[in-house]
Image (tube, helix red, strand yellow):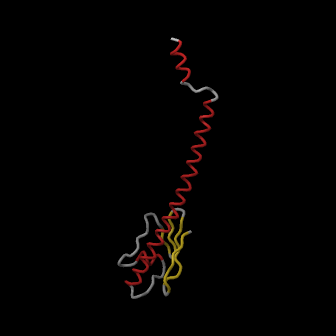
Amino acid sequence: MDARVERKRGQRFTLIELPIAIVVVGILAAIAIVGLGRLTSTGGKSACTASGEAATSASVAYYANNGNAWQANLAALVAARPPVFTPPSGAVVAGQTMKIGSWTLTETGGGTTQPTFACS
């Protein structure tokens, strides 16, 4: 009978081990939260870069479809018929910019010069 009581005591946390376990779990949680924050930042930048590359390709299609004329701004590229560029869901396109989440895609040029796109 004493062997059973001894085995049950060995499976419990002591008052010293419990705060140490809580601190270790807290440190691991903090590391995970910081890592996830960086991951979402990298994802947003990648999404912006991909949208910029898609807009560059779409502006070339716009140029070919519209008598060798570049679009006036990003909003004109989105409104083009036939459609050449569809912004990601949730994006707000106004004039030269497209904003979604924490990033903004900005067009420079257009009209008489080939447009370029930059992320911020």
Q: Nearer the viewer, residue 20 or 37?
A: 20
What quarter of the picture does the C terminus occupy? bottom right
Q: Nearer the viewer, residue 24 or 74?
A: 24
Residue 73 against residue 12 in the figure, above or below: below
Q: Residue at x 41, y 73 (%)?
A: 85
Residue situated furthest right in the rendering: 16
Residue 80, image quadrant: bottom left
Residue 109: % across, % down: 52, 82
Q: Residue at x 56, y 20 (%)?
A: 9
Residue 33: % across, % down: 56, 49
Residue 65 against residue 36 in the figure, above or below: below
Residue 7: % across, % down: 52, 19
Residue 31: % across, % down: 58, 47
Q: Is residue 65 left or right of residue 119?
A: left
Q: How many marks?
A: 0
Q: Residue at x 43, y 86 (%)?
A: 69
Q: Residue at x 50, y 80 (%)?
A: 115
Q: Nearer the viewer, residue 28 or 120?
A: 28
Residue situated furthest left in the rendering: 82
Residue 86, image quadrant: bottom left
Q: Is residue 66 left or right of residue 96?
A: left
Residue 35 against residue 104 in the figure, above or below: above
Residue situated furthest top in the rendering: 1
